[in-house]
Amino acid sequence: MATERSAVEARGVTKIFGHGPDAVRALDDVSIQIRENEFFTLLGPSGCGKTTLLRLIAGFELPTAGEILLEGEPVGHLPPNKRLVNTVFQSYALFPHMTVRQNIAFGLEMRGIDRATINPTVDEMLGLVQLAGYGNRRPSQLSGGQQQRVALARALANRPKVLLLDEPLSALDLKLRQGMRVELKNIQQQTGITFIFVTHDQEEALTMSDRLAVMSQGRIQQLGGPHEIYEQPVNRFVADFIGDTNFVLARVTAVENGRARCRSDSGLEFDVVAIADVAPGREVTFALRPEKIRLAKTDTPSRAKVVQATYVGTDTNYVVELADTSRLEVRVQNALDGHARFQVGDHVSIEVPAGAARMLMD
């Protein structure tokens, strides 16, 4: 369980690369507090600033403005090797001429730790990453997933206060990635070390994180737990980046007791939680997740028709055309026999349960 004590804090951090008209503002006045003992993820597309923020925490870059604090203390004056932080890179960066044991021991040896302490620490790390018995192998004799575990063990051996992970799973295939997600989360919980994980993969972020920050164009768009980020996106970017989303333009027809009744030009009607200052007559964009829409067959032509069906195993993804020719993506769990519930050409009725749509103000 994460505590409220701060492990890492960024205060008004801006990072600009270059000068004049060619200058790039990689981070723009970012402030964030990452708690001790939590698995925290920086999530966003390429170029959003997440790796730049990680490098600032590590000390590989210095901020143009603002400051980075570790355990409440400013660290701008400290070089990377003096910060209680270690980094696991996407490329693993293992020494090919060294054995697994030697790779894990390297950082301890550089600190002048005695051999009597190093050997049991290496054994402990090998057990932690489930590589006991692999100590005498070289990196070339290991799979990609095993190499990643060695890199993780090497980073953990120094007992850092914070472990930075820069897209460490992106080079692995899907099955290995899924397995390593579970292992990383387990290791973080066992060690109690604060993990700061950088990824562009929304599934990784949702399944592993205690909290996450969604970033775009050098700014934090939303900060919160996985459930909050997915279910309550604050703007169109977050709603679009996290999961699949339909964006529906509808007019507010009534507001009462904190809820708004809305209707689209296609005839969809639904109730949502009203946000500040919304009033009847206003047109608003709504985020509507495909899995929250309910379909039912109808024997007579209706306002909606299935125009595309894509079987994906547990579910079938449908595209439904509405009366105004706009389209919705709908995800429906397949029947017990594995068959899709609807076919292309089926006429369907559409229900949007109360609270399924999310009102967006931008």
Image (cartoon, grey):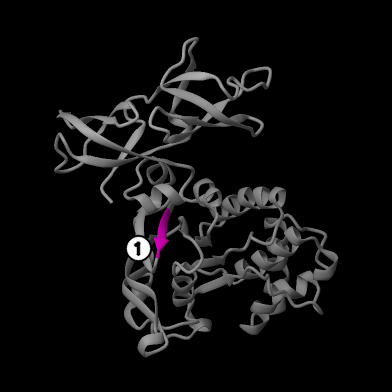
Residue 69 lies, in percent from the top left, at: 36, 74
Specify the farthest residue to the bottom: 19
Q: Is residue 214 magenta?
A: yes
Q: Residue at x 82, y 59 (%)?
A: 133
Q: Residue at x 72, y 61 (%)?
A: 126
Q: Is residue 229 left or right of residue 334?
A: left
Residue under label 1:
33
Q: Is residue 35 magenta?
A: no
In the depicted view, which residue is nearer to us: 100 or 335? 335
Which residues are drawn in magenta? Answer: 212-216
Total tally of numbered discs in the picture: 1
In the depicted view, which residue is nearer to us: 116 or 276? 276
Q: Is residue 126 left or right of residue 259?
A: right
Vertical order, 76 against 316 (above or below)? below
Residue 249 seen by the camera: yes
Residue 210 seen by the camera: no
Residue 37 lies, in percent from the top left, at: 46, 57
Specify the farthest residue to the top: 299
Q: Residue at x 47, y 30 (%)?
A: 321
Residue 338 lies, in percent from the top left, at: 68, 22
Q: Decide: few, some or many residues near mark 1? Use Cα within 10 Å; few <14, some 14-19, many ≥20.
A: some
Vertical order, 67 against 317 (above or below)? below
Q: Quadrant of residue 315?
A: top right
Label 1: element kind: strand
Residue 273 lies, in percent from the top left, at: 25, 34
In the depicted view, which residue is nearer to us: 87 or 216? 216
Amino acid type at image mark 1: Gln
Vertical order, 45 against 254 (above or below)? below
In the depicted view, which residue is nearer to us: 197 or 25? 25
Q: Main secondary structure of the magenta part?
A: strand
Vertical order, 206 against 296 (above or below)? below
Q: Residue at x 68, y 17 (%)?
A: 337
